[in-house]
Amino acid sequence: MFNLSIFLEDSARKYPARDALVLGDVRLTYAQVNGAANQVANLLVELGVQPGDRVALTCPNLPYFPIVYYGILKAGAVVVPMNVLNKGREVTYYLDDADAKVYFCFEGTPELPMGTEGKAGVDGAKSRPELILITADPSAPSPVEGARTLTEALAGKSPVFEAVLGAETDTAVILYTSGTTGQPKGAELSHSNLVLNALTCNRLFGSTPGTDVHLLTLPLFHSFGSTVQMNAGFSMGATLVLLPRFDAQAAIGLLQKEDVTFFAGVPTMWWGLLGALTEDVDVDRIASNLRVGVSGGAALPVEIIKEVQARLGVQVLEGYGLSETSPVATFSDPDKEPRPGSIGVPIWGVEVKLIDDDWNTVEGADQIGEIAIRGHLIMKGYLNRPEATAEVMKDGWFRTGDLARRDEDGFYYIVDRSKDMIIRGGYNVYPREIEEVLMTHPDVSLAAVVGVPHESHGEEVKAFVILREGASVTEEELVAWGKDQMASYKYPRIVAFVDSLPMTATGKILKRELVD
C-alpha cells in the first residue's frame, strides 16, 4: 500500500519548521504545507471524491499548486495538471476526456471551460466538474457564479487527514500530451513511476536531506518541474523558491537572495540567466552556493554550457525524457566527465535501446534508430486509448518517436525528433493539432505547420496556408485568430500564404522542404 504524498508527509515529520515553499515574502513550513494539503483532502472527501477519481488543477508556480497537488493524492484521487496557458476549448476537452470530478483553477487562468454553468458546453460533454477557484486575494468573493474560492471551500476543514493508501501501480497523475495525430492523450503515471523517478533524480544529483534550496521556474504542471524539483525536492526536505513566470533578472535576484543550490531549466532559461549577469550581480555568491545545474527539453548549446561553467562555476548536466517516462529516462553520468551535446546514459533501473520501424534492435556505435525505453518509469498507458497505447508499447518497451545515436561508450545523442514535433521555449508543439485548429477557420483550405529557428525560443511556429477561393483574411488577422484559439506557446507567430504545398505522390506534405 502506497501514496506519492508520503514525500510531503515524511518531510513534515522530519523537518516541520523548515521552509518548504517560498514566494516573495511568503514562507511556508513543511508543517504548514502538510496541514493545508490535509484540508484539501478533507474537502475532496466532503465533495464525494472517491479513490481513483480524477481532479484537475490549473495553477502557476504558486504555493497553492503543491498544496492542492498533494491534497488530491492524499484523498486517493488522481491529479490532472493542466497548462495555465490553455484556452477554454482546450480546458473543456481535458476536463471531459479525464471525466474530472473537481477542477481547481487559478483565477488568472486565461479562460475557464466553455459553455454554460454546470455543463462543459460541447456536444456530448459530461457534466461540468465542481469548480474551486484559487484566488490571489483570499477575501475576494468568487467571480464565477456557482463556484467557490479555495479559501471559502477550506474554511473550517481539519488540517489532519490520514492519507488513502492504494497499490503502487494505481494511477497518481495523468499528464496530457498532444500526439502527432488526433487529440491529446492522457498518459497515466502510477505512484511507483513517480516515486522511483524522483528518488533516482536525487541519487543522480547527490542530494542530501534538509539542505538544498531549489529555484523553481519550470512550470509545475509539466513533468520536468513536478518530478525533478517538486517531488524530488519534497522527498529530501528541500526548500522550493517559486518564480511564477521566468524572468532572468528576477531569477538572478533570487539566486543571490535565497542562496540557491539547485537550478533546473530549459536552454532558453540558461541563455537568459547569462544575459542577466550584469556588473551589479554578486556572481561569486551565486557560484559559491549553486551546486547543481540541470537542463532539459532540448539540446543545450555547448557554448552556453562552457559559459555557465566559467561564470557561475557549475557544470550543467543534461537529461532526456517524456511525459510518458515520468519523465527522466537518461541523464549525464555523475561518475564520468559530462559530454556536451549528449543526453547521457540510462538512469538506474532503466534500459534504453535503438530500434527500427519494426521494433528490431539497431546495433553498432553511431547507428541511428528510434529510442525505446523499458523500466520502472514507463506509463501504464494512455487513458481510455488501448489502441494508441499498443502503437507505442510492446513487451514493456516504449517507443519515443525520437531518433538518436549511441557512441562506443554508451552515451546517447538526439539527432532528430521524428514526426515533426516542434520545441518552442521548452514546450512541445505538435503540428497536427495546430493544423487541425487552423483548418476550422472559414478562410483556410489547407495548412502545414513547421518549426523554424528562433534565437531565444529555439524554434518558432510557422504555418504555410492555402486559402479558400475568395478568402480575404490577412496574415495578421489569422495570427490574431490563432492567438484566441490556442495556448500562447502553440499558435503560429508566422503565417505564409501559398498556392500549393510540396507533396509526395501519395499526398503526404513534405515538411522538410518547407523548413528548408
Image: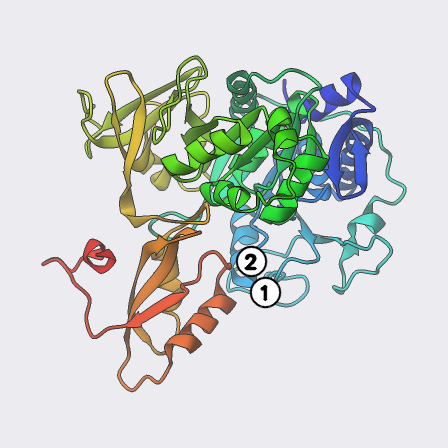
Q: Tell me, for residue 92, which label it has, or none.
A: 2
The C terminus, quarter of image: bottom left
Mark 2, Cα crowd under 10 Å, few <14 / some 14-19 / many 20+, is: many
Q: Is residue 171 left or right of residue 70?
A: left
Q: Toward which corner of the image does residue 460 lie, by quadrant? A: bottom left
Secondary structure at numbered mark 2: helix
Kind of residue indicated by mark 2: Thr
- Extreme-front residue of the structure: 279
Mark 1, Cα crowd under 10 Å, few <14 / some 14-19 / many 20+, is: some
Task: State whether residue 3 is above or below residue 510.
Answer: above
**In-front residue for pair 33/166:** 33
Task: State whether residue 483 is above or below residue 60.
Answer: below
As measured in the structure, the alpha-carbon distance from the residue carrying label 2 to the one carrying label 1 is: 6 Å
Q: Position of residue 302 (x, y in %)?
A: 37, 35
Kind of residue indicated by mark 1: Met
Q: Toward which corner of the image does residue 370 lie, by quadrant? A: top left
The N terminus, quarter of image: top right
Secondary structure at numbered mark 1: loop
The answer to the question of whether label 2 and label 1 lie on touching residues, with beta carbons closer than 8 A, is yes
Which residue in the protein does label 1 denote? 114
Q: Name the residue located 43 percent from the left edge and 29 percent from the top edge.
A: 318
